[in-house]
Amino acid sequence: MSSFGDKSLIPASALENPVFPRELEDEAIYIMREVAAQFERPAILFSGGKDSITLVRLAQKAFYPGKIPFPLLHVDTGHNFPETIDYRDWLVNEVGADLIVRTVQDSIDQGKVKEETGKYASRNALQTVTLLDAIEEFKFDACIGGGRRDEEKARAKERIFSVRDDFGQWDAKRQRPELFDMLNGRIAVGENVRVFPISNWTELDVWNYIKEEGIPLPSIYFSHRRPVFERDGMLWADSVYINKDEDEVPYEATVRFRTVGDMTCTAAVLSEATELDDIIGEILSAEISERGARMDDKRSEAAMEKRKQQGYF
Amino acid sequence: MDILRIATAGSVDDGKSTLIGRLLYETQSITRDKLEALDAASKRKGLDFLDLSLLTDGLIAEREQGITIDVAHIYFSTPKRKYIIADTPGHFEYTRNMVTGSSNAKVSLILVDARHGVVEQTFRHFFISAMLRIPKVIVCVNKMDLVGYSEERFNQIRDEFQRIADQIHSDGQTIDFIPVSSLFGVNITSKSDEMSWYPGDSLLHALESIETHTLWETSRPARFPVQYVIRPKTEEYHDYRGYAGVVASGSFSVGDEVVVLPTGQRSKISTIEKFDEQLQKVNARESVVLTLENDVDVSRGNMLVKPGEEPVQRKEITAQVCWLDYQALQAGKTLILQHGINDTKAKVISVDEIVNVQSLERIASPGQLKLNEIGSIRLKVAKPVFADIYEENPANGAFILVDEFTHATVGVGFVNH
């Protein structure tokens, strides 16, 4: 699909004044290669968001001129933005990677999880079960994720190699110390490791990298017109997946998304940013942090840590 | 843009979290929603000011205990550079976290409470900074507001600290002292009137002027541990064999003669590649792919070096070790020794010495090394390790010890000889 090619031109400003710290790329590529060397069946957890898109780019660079030696795993909630799915299919074709898709709908149909109801119903929490099932089905021993330590307080303590038990659980007190750049991925049968190559990147680093590398992105990251409605002081994309109250009346607005998750839990921001430079400008002057636009973390102050303990990324 | 990695350490209650919070606040690294959450949480605690320490105290267990229990990573940046703080706890039990958090740091930030002066913990923090050979130590004498911003008190603490530092010899490590008040933001990002007697820089200014370049690492002997062999096996790259890895130290150029360890075979570098880019030269810390002129046998765990500066191939290692596990280390124990990306079975021949990091007293033949203890051990390895002496080349002189059964990382070692 050629539509993604439009964003692939590297802005002149990126070439004149590179600001992305290249050490971060060296570190991430080193981690990717350690995963390939230390594990038998790794996978990249691919959500279609900018962080997992960055991971694919890093994997591509780490093994060039060879292909990425592991598949992309997409846990599909069924509530994705259609633009994300289009992009996903284009990307796997572009880099020649294998794609595995497992759906939350299947987990619901199998009776393993129950659909949430009510105004704030989301499949975000349900995807953990689908993910753990996929890990078991394919015997993945390492899952590479786009988590960053700057996203949230509980993530700030995450390791680069994060060991999970049979139930995918994270135990803050059992994490292995990571010294220098030495990564210890030795595990027992049934255990697996979550790997976070861009642990040390901030949101701004990711954007600067995307800009300097000329990486195409799904169109919803850029300003566009779409029907939205207001809830809790935030803007939400109108979709059949969200149960609206009577007074939540959709109207058309010019928006973009700073983060790409499900339509049910990812808020839009009013934005005229049509280019990466505009987006980076917005972030530099941003008043709301990235995860502030994610409803799933707002449920409680310790929300993320609790979800991590249950096997969330 | 470069990165400066900082390790912070301090005892409980000496205001470390507040100091970090203050740095974030004054470099405008806190977004509005986080400030609002902070304001609300501060009010819940009945405070009439922003409790900046709440920004970094992350985990549930911490909120219960009110202390930091693990290494947390905190990020901020200025127009000049990106900063990564590894915030490590100051408790006795958690030396292992301090060593972990400090292992990648170029700066060690040590906090001293102006009222209490140099305490036992201060020894430990400094000892670890010296053991890891962190090039820069900045001692922040905090809570100066509580001692009336007294120059005399500051000098007293500085002199006492210096006296300890003199006992732990470490070449090339410099120590700065800065009087600060994190609570009131004095000397954190800018100088202030309260301590006009202090002629030095504010903390942020001191951090901004530290050199982060890898010149020192690049001037060490060339070491390239082969991390992964790339063999595309496609039509276009039929016979391609690329050796991927990070240059641990030194530098490599196209045409350089190299020796493959452990086989001793020789070859020449034919290309240095970074994705689709061809380089002429690569320096320490960079991830690249090297291709060699002739068909030599190279696999993961091998090391490429330059003739004339080969490391010793060690079958026996004497090292300073910090033990990180609840089960003590004893002679006779077998472990996995991981040096960089290479590993081998290892057996502890003897535990020769233990260092009391408070008194600096050394006790010979202690029999064992317990959690958080630091001592000297001798190890025998199943296959040779190409390590340098840590003091001479830190990038190739450290290793970790891994338990064969639990797979936990149970120790970290620094090669003595």
Image: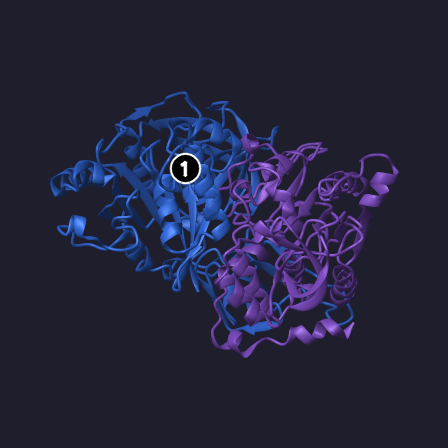
Chain colours: A purple, B blue
Q: Quadrant of residue B242?
A: bottom right
Q: Which residue, as the protein is rendered here, is positioned at the far bottom?
A: A12
Looking at the image, residue B90 lies above or below residue A25: above
Quadrant that contains the N terminus of chain B: bottom left
Spot occupied by residue B101 in the image (x, y as percentages of width and height): 44, 42
Report whether A253 appears left or right of B277. Answer: right
Is disc 1 placed on a helix, strand or loop?
helix
Report whether B131 appears left or right of B192. Answer: right
Q: Which residue, as the protein is rendered here, is positioned at the far front?
A: A247
Q: In this orientation, which residue lies closer to the viewer: A217 or A145?
A: A217
Q: Residue at x 32, y 58 (%)?
A: B210
Report whether B76 appears left or right of A26. Answer: left
According to the picture, the residue beneath numbered tag 1 turns out to be B98
Query: Could you classify mark 1 by the number of other residues whose Cα lies within 10 Å: few (under 14), some (14-19), or many (20 or more)?
Result: many
Q: Which residue, as the protein is rendered here, is positioned at the far right?
A: A109
Q: Which residue, as the protein is rendered here, is positioned at the far top?
A: B367
Q: In this orientation, which residue lies closer to the viewer: B308 or A93?
A: A93
Looking at the image, residue B233 lies above or below residue B368: below
Q: In this orientation, which residue lies closer to the viewer: B354 or A45?
A: A45
Identify the amino acid type marked 1: Met
Spot occupied by residue A164 in the image (x, y as percentages of width and height): 65, 36
Marked residue chain, label 1: B
Q: How many marks?
A: 1
Quadrant that contains the C terminus of chain B: top left
Spot occupied by residue B208 in the image (x, y as percentages of width and height): 33, 59
Q: In this orientation, which residue lies closer to the viewer: B357 or B265?
A: B357
